[in-house]
Image (spheres, helix red, strand yellow):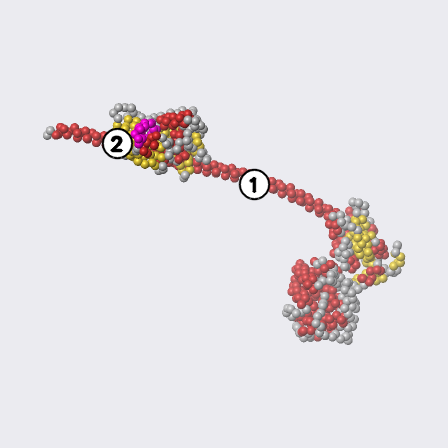
Amino acid sequence: MLPDEIKPAMQGAIPSTIVTCSLSGVPNVTDISQVWYVDATHVALSYQFFNKTHRNVRENPFAEVIIRDPQTFQEWYLEIQYDHAEESGPLFEAMDIQLEAIASLTGMSGVFKLRAADVYSVLSVRKSTSRA
Amino acid sequence: MTAEPDNAPTVRKQMIENQAIIDRLNAALARKTDEVRIIQQISAEISATLELDRILVISLEAMDLVLGFRHSMILLAGEDESTLAVAACRGYDGTKTWAAIPVGQGIFGVAARRRRIVRMGNIRAQRAYLSGVRARMEAGGHTGLKPAAEMPGLADAQSQLGIPLVVKDRLVGVLGVESAAPNAFDELDEMLLSIVGNQVANGIDNARLHQASNERSRELDAANAALLRLNETLEAKVAARTVELSAVLDQVRHEKDLSESLLSRMAPPEVIPLMLQDKLFAQRLDVTVMFTDLEDFTAYASGMEPDEIFAQLNEFFSWAGEIIKRYRGYINKTNGDGIMALFGVPFESATYRTDAVLAALAMQREIELRFPFGMRVGISSGTVTAGMLGPTNKSLYDVLGEAVNIASRMEAICPRGGVSVSPGCEEVLKPWFRLEPLAEQEVKGIGRLTCLTVAGLRAIGGDARRVDATSRFAADYLQVVEEIEAFKQDRLVVIDLISLQARDVALQHNEAVASYAVALLRMLRKDGAAGADWDAIDEAALIAAALLHDCGKHALDPARLNDRGLDSAGRDRLRSDLLDGTSRTLRQIGQDGVAPVIAELYRFEATRGAVGVYRPEVEILAAADIYDALTAPKIYKGSPWSIVGALAELMRLPYCQDRMRSAFVTFAELMKPAGALIAVRARPEVIIR
């Protein structure tokens, strides 16, 4: 269950970190721009480019993300499991609009295309004791 | 009891926590209440005005002062919804202006394009992230990326919330708020602003509609004013142009009248169109030439002032011209107190010889009554050459030929009050006129001639072709002719019957018909003839009907009256037109009382009595009319019928055979020579005139 107090950390003010692992056990750590709050038990990641993270979770659905509250710098550790991808609907659209807005600001309108909103089930939530 | 101390802090703690929750809820409720009140207030203010600028200012003021959004702006969409321009903003450096942005650029632009609320609280990080991507893409050789967009508002905005302003599917603009702090806006703000945005959008739309309708109304006013000015100008122009044109038209009419009146002094009116087309060529014509001269005018005028002399002479010329015109003549020229007139010009006429004599007789009859001087008239007929004659610009329509000289000589030897004609006219004139020879005279340039004077029209009773000397008419009813003359003088002086008769040389036809009809009526009464109540017939009405039965002739073209080549349809048309003209004339002279009888007479003659009701006076008139038509001298019809032949013809007419009308039988008795027998024989077809 995602607590309300986690929401500021999910606004994407500070990039998040995701850790995945290939089927053969090779881990991968990378920064992503935002982890979206879907509901108390789900989060979403944007799928824009085919990359290692994307490939890994399709092979091995388990991943861990670290998100950070921009005001308190509190870190949260979330164990998540890939559930499904949405290519339309309110969630997809909300993510798409934001991507479009930011892309238009950086002179990259039309370059980015949100391919899908990858929805993950939250398996566990852990508040870090140290500050990032 | 040991539990109590353990429990007490827990309960207290719980109570404090509960109180905190209640306080929070109360605070939230208070905020909610405030917000509702604020929104209502903003709505009311926006609704209260229709001025766009005022709406924008009110909205942003409320956003700042009431809702606490420090930096806000309203961007309005352009006509084609492709751009957004800042129409109002609050919380920025007042001197700063921003260029319009394309729809779809930035948070506000995307809100506009997608028509969805867009809320971001991490713009700086997201931008940085994407800038990194961009840098990598560019490092990887990706080219053609647009430069980073220049956006209105805070340069370092971390949070933005854009509310699309949409009314009836049309993009009005975007309501935007922003903050340099991350995550400055939450879902509640989003909801709050979407309500406010809705109000703002409607307010802007109403204001625009109002503005548009104001503009439209101003445009209409301007258009109306322009139209009004145009109309006034146009009316004035039309009026001025009309005045101008009618002045020109008047001028043209005046000039046309003037030139025609000038031309009519040079030639007969009929040839003026030819003259104007320069197509009037000299031609040979059979004409009658008439000269008149006043007797003793010089002596008469010797004691008069010149203007009196001219006035007197001009009055004479006008009078003479009037009569000559009535008989279809034309005054060619005047010489001193003399006139030269032509008959049978400019076109051939069937009656030019009798017309001239009749005009001369009419003039001599009247001049005694109107002028204190006498007149001589000389007439001659012959072939002449007619055309324009004289020096250029002063030519006259004139004739050349021996007839001109002879007519002039005839005038010279004519006795005062007389009408002299050349010997050559005798054969043509003698059927109608009493001609008396003058002593044989030497006529200059021609030789010795026995000239003639016209004493007047032959009397009906003295004309053996019309009235047999041994008939009962001659014996018992000759005085009727005098009575008819008296009736004419007394009752019908307005009609110049002779000028009507001149048109087809049916001279004295009307008088003859009236005389025969009256004589017949009296004989029917006297003999007590069967068939009708002869006493009931009004004699005066009968005379009037007889005298006026063809008084519409003046309206018909003489050429038509004298056309003997008419087929039966042509004769029917002529008869019908003659009746129409006669009915009109009767109305004009106040004699329409006789119109029904005359109409019946035409009907009777057209159908030979086959149609209509029996009217004894119509039978009487028909007998008299047909008889005179047959026996009277004809100018183009060869010899007229003998009296016996005409009466026999009358008795052969279908209406006599079928019913043996007593009027016709008695008429034969009246007119036949003593002892003659008028046979009544059947004949299948009869052609009457």
Q: Position of residue B402 (x, y in %)?
A: 84, 55
Q: Quadrant of residue B34?
A: top left
Residue B166 appears in the picture as rendered: yes
Residue ID at (26%, 26%): A128
Quarter holding the C terminus of chain B is bottom right
Residue ID at (81%, 50%): B335
Numbered range of the magenta stretch: A18-38
The dominant secondary structure in magenta is: strand
Q: Which mark is residue B275?
A: none
Q: On screen, B154 above or below A92? A: above
Residue B123 appears in the picture as rendered: no
Label 1, residues with CA under 10 Å away: few <14, some 14-19, many ≥20: few
Q: On screen, B404 above or below B54? A: below
Label 2, residues with CA under 10 Å away: few <14, some 14-19, many ≥20: some
Residues at badges 1 and 2 in contact (C-beta under 8 Å)?
Answer: no
Residue topped by disc 2: A124
What amino acid type should be assigned to the residue bearing mark 2?
Ser
Q: Chain of mark 2?
A: A
Residue topped by disc 1: B231
Q: Position of residue B618 (x, y in %)?
A: 67, 68
